[in-house]
């Protein structure tokens, strides 16, 4: 069986298209995965910010605004004794 130059060119074009499609598909998939990780990371940062604000609001600074002054006064009173 003999192959002509036309047959070899056709096979070369088909293989080149398949390889190009495969590389493009891999690049697109990796970009999609990177974007999904970035979205998850930003959602984690948003959740962390919400939790941080919640903890801060429940901390002594949020519950007893002048607790530092009271502790300083208490320490000063007891230090003088």
Image (cartoon, rainbow, N blue to C red):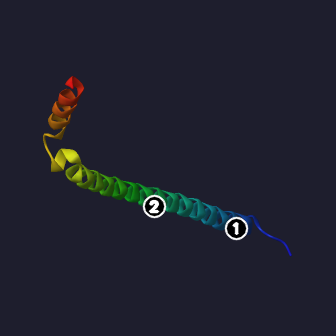
Give the residue pinned by disc 2: 32
Q: Quadrant of residue 17?
A: bottom right
Q: Is residue 53 left or right of residue 65?
A: right
For this orientation, the residue located farthest to the bottom is 1
Q: Which mark is residue 73?
A: none
Q: Quadrant of the C terminus?
A: top left
Between residues 37 and 23, which one lies in front from this camera angle?
Answer: 37
Q: Residue 26: horizontal and vertical position, in percent?
A: 56, 61
Q: Is residue 60 left or right of residue 26?
A: left
Specify few, some or many for label 2: CA neighbours under 10 Å numbering under 14, 14-19, or 20 or more.
few
Tell me whether circle 2 and circle 1 mark residues in contact (CB < 8 Å): no
Q: Nearer the viewer, mark 2 or mark 1?
A: 2
Q: Is residue 51 left or right of residue 32?
A: left
Q: Quadrant of the N terminus?
A: bottom right
Cα–Cα gap, marks 2 and 1: 31 Å
The residue lying at 19 percent from left, 27 percent from top is 76
Between residues 10 and 6, which one lies in front from this camera angle?
Answer: 10
Q: Quadrant of residue 6?
A: bottom right
How many labels, in total?
2
Give the residue pinned by disc 1: 11
Between residues 41 and 24, which one lies in front from this camera angle?
Answer: 41
Specify few, some or many for label 1: CA neighbours under 10 Å numbering under 14, 14-19, or 20 or more.
few
Task: Name the secondary structure under disc 2.
Answer: helix
Q: Residue 24: horizontal and vertical position, in percent?
A: 54, 60
Task: Name the secondary structure under disc 1.
Answer: helix
The residue lying at 20 percent from left, 36 percent from top is 71
For this orientation, the residue located farthest to the top is 80
- Residue 75 vs 34, above or below: the answer is above
């Amino acid at each position: 069986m003999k192959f002509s130059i036309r047959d070899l060119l056709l096979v070369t074009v088909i293989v080149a298209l398949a390889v190009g499609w495969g590389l493009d598909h891999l690049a697109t998939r990796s970009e999609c995965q990177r974007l999904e990780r970035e979205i998850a990371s930003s959602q984690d940062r948003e959740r962390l910010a919400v939790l941080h604000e919640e903890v801060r609001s429940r901390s002594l600074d949020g519950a007893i605004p002048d607790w530092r002054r009271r502790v300083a006064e208490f320490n000063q009173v007891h230090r003088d004794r």
